[in-house]
Amino acid sequence: MIDRKEKIMQASIQLFVQRGFHNTSTRMIAEQAGVSEGLIFRHFRSKDALLDSLLQQGADEMYQAVAEIISEHEPKDFLSKLVDSFFDIPSERFDYWRLRSQIQSIRTEWEPEEWERYLREGVLRMFKEMGFSKFELEAELLYQSLSGIRDGIVRGQIHDPEPLRELVKKKYRL
Amino acid sequence: MIDRKEKIMQASIQLFVQRGFHNTSTRMIAEQAGVSEGLIFRHFRSKDALLDSLLQQGADEMYQAVAEIISEHEPKDFLSKLVDSFFDIPSERFDYWRLRSQIQSIRTEWEPEEWERYLREGVLRMFKEMGFSKFELEAELLYQSLSGIRDGIVRGQIHDPEPLRELVKKKYRL
Amino acid sequence: MIDRKEKIMQASIQLFVQRGFHNTSTRMIAEQAGVSEGLIFRHFRSKDALLDSLLQQGADEMYQAVAEIISEHEPKDFLSKLVDSFFDIPSERFDYWRLRSQIQSIRTEWEPEEWERYLREGVLRMFKEMGFSKFELEAELLYQSLSGIRDGIVRGQIHDPEPLRELVKKKYRL
Amino acid sequence: MIDRKEKIMQASIQLFVQRGFHNTSTRMIAEQAGVSEGLIFRHFRSKDALLDSLLQQGADEMYQAVAEIISEHEPKDFLSKLVDSFFDIPSERFDYWRLRSQIQSIRTEWEPEEWERYLREGVLRMFKEMGFSKFELEAELLYQSLSGIRDGIVRGQIHDPEPLRELVKKKYRL
DNA sequence: GATGAATGAGTATTCATTCAT
DNA sequence: AATGAATGAATACTCATTCAT
């Protein structure tokens, strides 16, 4: 049972998603992780810092994913990868998205992270390159639609995303 | 300063949305509403019951809105009204949607309300009537896209929704 | 539904006995009595005053009972009546005795009421008149024994008191 | 100031007896015990559980006392020890008896503990062995009388119990 | 006499966090 | 690194009591 820090992070993201951040006590986390309550505060300055770690961990993975998409300069390929990135969320990362959505609806001061801004700029550029007259609108629409779909997936409302992905791609001829 | 019950409801939805339900104390609500803490519990059995009242109030309004849409039997008109209902959210109701989204991400046992099921069935029927071969997919895609857009609107990420509405309607020839 | 004051007293003694004085709220009393909470405070200065009224009412009845016993000057008759008074408690007065015992075990400053002092003096006098050498001890023993029996009766531990009464009387040749 | 758990128990039984269980707040207990309020709940699940601990502690001592009495098979010796056990209550245990009596008059569902049932059965058996025709009545009378006396002692109504003990023993030729 | 809305102080209990070991 | 005892502030909720009607 080494790496108790990892244990704590796993236990806490699970509980935060299931019960809500403010409705999860450090005692519960300690129990679920099988460690003492005190240990949490040796590894994380505070409960808030623990949350930040969790969010940061997810954001780090997103930077990589976004880098991979952005590296694509051919518009169709870019958009195809973009769509895939919204559909191919490994189930281990569901919790990250649910946590993110929860925090977003609690912290009103929430601002889009950098990776998100990069990504949206990329989408904008691609639609422009493809010669759409209302490229800004098209970019916005696609992004919000994909966001809605991602929410549906991680919340378990969409059980079979595959045909939906096909449909989206077909609409944009990807 | 009559109707303190209403005062309490206003104060609490505001705070719940700003700070999160579990991060808002009944004492804060009382202060914001300008009443004593005890009064909250004379009007609502518990903090949870207060939350339920808030959600119910919003759901009641949704039933009316949905009834109006469903009364339309011509597919194009139905879908046009549907799209409008996602775009025409009066700003007073922003808080309801933000609260709803927050609770959805905290209460894992959350199930779609009846009005939502009615609405989705309606969309399905309309796409079928319009002769779409993959009507189920089309319905799903439209619904999730609109949900994503609504989230964007109430979260203040979409500043001018009008051209976006036009674009959506044009895509579906409404 | 006249005489709500009486209703309040009935409801409160019942609840005080069942749940304990400090564990019974005025709201419960009001509900049980079918009156508004405010009315309790129109009829009684405070919850404590209500309790005092209840105890006083019981004490008043005891004064009469004691007067009747004391009026007897023949020792054997006195003691016979005394014993009877401990055994013949009408069931409507069970609650008074249970309340009294409860309060006695909560209010440490409790002092025996006057009727009790009168009664004990009477017992003493009678044993003296009957020529007992250790009349004080005999009086004490009889009084405490009868008290124990009364407790047993009102608590429902003694189901058939009659033969017990016979036995006591026989022991003292009454 | 070690063993704060013991400190808490001492402080609470004292206060419960003086002021009544429901009239004693956990804050008072904490102050009296010189600990923080939170600590009470680390050592006891709830205020009720604290009370149960107190009662259990007393009951444990009674089991031993009863075992000692029951080990006596000679009726006269048994009864002599029985009488002594009601008279020889060390003053440290006065509080237990007062607490017990208080709780008995508040919790209506109270049932005699096992040690009490054992003891009463023993008394019954002894009177039978001694050839009393109405042995059940005799047992009941003795038990209730002794209970009344014990109440008198722990409530401080009987200042010198010794001669009373002699008298009781003489009556039963012990 | 009677109501019921309203209050402020108080309730048991939980919280995130600290610290000696 | 790791524990678990300890804390003080905060929590949702209840209380006896008041008062305008």
Image (cartoon, coloured by chain):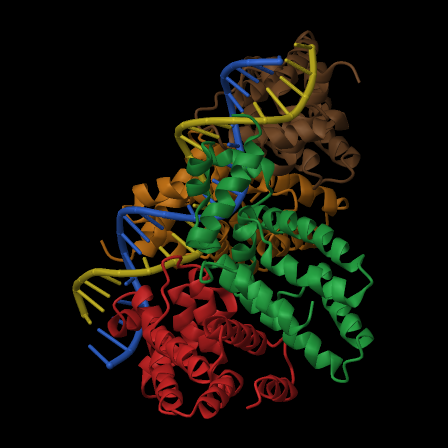
Chain colours: A red, B green, C brown, D orange, E yellow, F blue
Q: Against C75, is D135 above or below?
A: below
Residue situated in front as seen by the camera: B161 or A166:
B161
Q: Against C10, is D39 above or below?
A: below
The x, y position of residue C100, in whole percent, is: 59, 27
Residue situated in front as seen by the camera: B83 or C38:
B83
Left or right placement of residue F9 versus residue A18 in this view:
left
The x, y position of residue D103, in whole percent, is: 55, 42
Q: Residue at x 67, y 72 (%)?
A: B172
Q: Residue at x 58, y 56 (%)?
A: D115
Q: Is residue C33 visible?
A: yes
Q: Against D119, is B9 above or below?
A: above
Q: Residue at x 43, y 41 (%)?
A: B27
The x, y position of residue C136, in whole percent, is: 52, 22
| Quadrant assignment for the C terminus of chain D | top right
Left or right placement of residue C56 versus residue F6 in this view:
right
Q: Residue at x 38, y 50 (%)?
A: D9
Q: Is residue C75 visible?
A: no
The x, y position of residue D112, in whole percent, is: 63, 50
Numbered disc total? 0
Residue situated in front as seen by the camera: A71 or B147:
A71
Asked which quadrant contains residue C87, the reply is: top right
Asked which quadrant contains residue B34, the reply is: top left
